Image: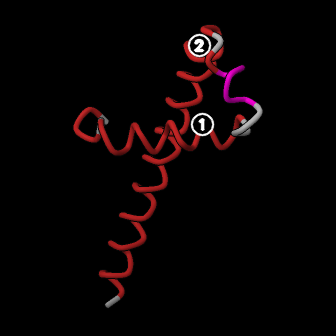
């Protein structure tokens, strides 16, 4: 039982590290590509920057899992 809990804890840790890495990638994409292109200004009033980063992270998670 203890070994199983340790495995679950380890898998959760890996999951959270992956999610953090994906959010970092999304933040980099936002800062270096989307913001300079001016796309942020069109939707900046509708979606706060933090929520937009999470949205981009979600898209990365859905469409690019083999690469991460």
The N terminus sits in image quarter: bottom left
Above or below: residue 45 compared with residue 4: above
| SS for dot 2 | helix
Is 13 situated left or right of 44 in this image?
left
| SS for dot 1 | helix
Bounds of the magenta span? 40-44
Kindly indicate the quadrant of the structure image that contains residue 27.
top right
Question: Which residue is identified by label 2?
Answer: 32
Is 47 situated left or right of 34 in this image?
right
How far across and down, in percent of the image, does residue 37 sit? Answer: 60, 8
Above or below: residue 17 compared with residue 22: below
Q: Nearer the viewer, residue 63 or 22?
A: 63
Number of on-image labels: 2
Residue at 36 percent across and 86 percent down: it is: 2
Please check the rendered image and state whether residue 42 is part of the magenta-colored stretch, yes or no. Answer: yes
The C terminus sits in image quarter: top left
Question: Which residue is identified by label 1?
Answer: 53
How far across and down, in percent of the image, does residue 53 sit? Answer: 60, 36
How far across and down, in percent of the image, does residue 67 sit? Answer: 26, 32
Q: Nearer the viewer, residue 8 or 64?
A: 64
Secondary structure, magenta segment, majority class:
helix
């Amino acid at each position: 039982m203890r070994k199983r809990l340790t495995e679950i804890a380890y898998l959760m840790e890996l999951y959270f590290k992956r999610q953090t890495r994906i959010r970092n990638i999304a933040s980099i994409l936002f800062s270096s590509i989307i913001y300079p292109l001016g796309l942020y200004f069109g939707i900046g009033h509708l979606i706060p920057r933090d929520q937009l980063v999470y949205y981009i992270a979600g898209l990365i998670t859905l469409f690019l899992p083999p690469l991460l």
